[in-house]
Amino acid sequence: MTTSMDETRIRTEGLNLFYGPKQALKSVSVDLKKSRVTALIGPSGCGKSTFLRALNRMNDLIDDVHVEGKVLIEGVDIYDPKVDVVELRKRVGMIFQKSNPFPKSIYENVAYGPRINGVNDRSKLDEMVERSLRQAALWDEVKDDLTKSGLALSGGQQQRLCIARAMAVNPEILLMDEPASALDPIATAKIEELIYQLKSTYTIVIVTHNMQQAARVSDDTAFFYLGELIEMDETKKMFTAPSKKQTEDYVTGRFG
Amino acid sequence: MRSSDLYTRKFHVSEFLAEKLIAATAFLSFAVIILIFVFVFREALPIFSSSEPATHDEAVQEEVETYGEEALGEASQLRAAEEKERRAGSIEHVEGNASLRNLLSTDWQPVSGEPKFGLLPLIVGSLKVSLIAILLAAPLAILAALYTSTFAPKRVKEILKPAIEILAGFPSVVIGFFALIVLATFVQDLFGTMYRLNAFVGGVALSLAVIPIVYTIAEDAIAAVPKSMTEASLALGATSWQTALFVTLPAATPGIFAAVLLGVGRAFGETMIVLMATGNAALMTFNVTDPVRTMSATIGAEMAEVVFGDTHYNVLFLIGSILFIFTFTLNAVAEFYIRRRLLRKFRGG
């Protein structure tokens, strides 16, 4: 793992996370780099989704969560009491496993983020909606019916709509929690293609259950097991010559 | 498996009977509702069928009056006796003429030399009191529902939610009594109203009965908004208040609308509270500090003393029919909204 400090966008130091008495993350220390896609892999319940949600403090919404250690984004500890969670989440966007558009029109779905930030100028909103939908590779498919309900789109389109919605608030980091797990292969391919295009602009962290997907889309891969970060390295190395036995067993499908 | 093993179907008597019994019970309750429906409308019908006064036989009249003596207290016995004397004596009982013109007049004086059956003050009364009640109850109940389902800590919710719902089981006569003794004095001291019992006092008391109904259904509607939707909003950097206002509430609108409709229905049909707290004067005014007489309170107050089969009697049933149709329509619309709109909203289209 060769990382110089100026490439690091997210760094965790001894991150422990508890759900009540149960420890879900055990002393996770990791550097996630700019302009790269990092895949988080590991068997169900290993803590990879918990880790992802710790990066924009979505775990705060769950009762009885307790966090120790540090999560530094651009050097700022996001668990510092002085940090504004709302501001943090604007900078760290999130895409969920199940696409969750609002029961509003396609346009209003994308315009939601800018609107809550006080943008009301119609032409400015139009521009932001178009830019975000283009970035999410959805513009050509929906440009003629922006007033249609977001829920009327297909599953893959809904997920891309959610990505457009997240990008409309100009985040620096995109967290994706198994974004393609509910999609068919064609829709999945489109999402993966999109991730590939977006990585020059955003730092992307993606949780996936699909080994091939991790191998295809990511530059770095982190393997979690029972709440611990077992190993993290360049994806190529992780899948061909991992240094830990557990990683090798998992990526070759011996358990999981 | 040999095929003959399958041909062993038996007839289970107890299962058959239990099934039929449950079905019969269901149909019985349905039939009872239909019969009440038919009865109320049938009794109101003579008003439309003939302009000439309906006749009523003495025996039935006698029966009604002894019923009054048995069931009511000493004071009412005395009053019933006076009534009987008055009818038997000099003043002849006057059958009213419930022409459409009379029904649409603005005077409700059903027992007088020339009975007036103007329904307008009663309809205005009901609308006025219900409107006050729902204007007070709906915002309170909806905000309370929003608070307990989205903002409140778990512990607070566990106490608050059942507490408000218990209010729904509160006997309305107790609420009426409270309004009559405590609330009316309080309101008069506060605003210096001319009449102690008035539409406003009745509306406030009625809102106490309406709040738990609106609250319960609105809470369900808000809780039914998928968590994934609120999470999406929060992940975009919306505050929890923005999320509640722009995502949760709009998504729950059909359910909340239904809740308010059912609340209006309850307010419209509620009798005891308005009977005790509104002053019961059939005034045709839009002033909220005037006493008011609602349709339901009119039936509640007059049905026991009316002459069986009389025009007055028929008019009371007409009022009952109007109430029935009104609440039935409200409930049907509310039901439609909950079932169709809410579900469709989350499935797309």
Image: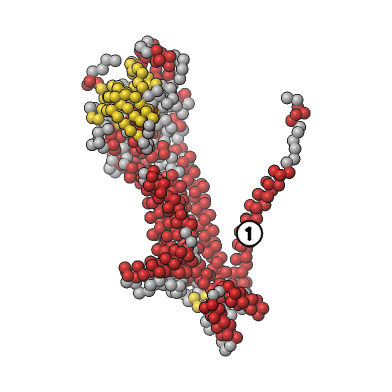
On screen, B29 above or below A93?
below
Looking at the image, residue B321 lies above or below residue B311: above
**Taking the image as drawn, is residue B221 in sight?**
yes
Most extreme residue toward the right, as rendered? B4
Q: How far across and how far down the image is residue B96, in percent?
A: 57, 79
Residue for point 45% across, 43% down: B224
Residue drawn at (43%, 16%) of the image: A250
Residue A67 pos. (x, y %): 31, 31
Q: Hey, which quadrant is residue B320 in on the image?
A: bottom right
Spot the residue most to the top: A241
Q: Residues within 10 Å of mark 1 (few under 14, many from 20)?
A: few
- Amino acid type of the residue tagged 1 in the rendering: Val
Q: Is any atom of residue A145 visible in this view?
A: no
Q: Which residue is mark 1?
A: B32
Element under disc 1: helix
**Which residue is nearer to you in this view: B38 or B86?**
B86
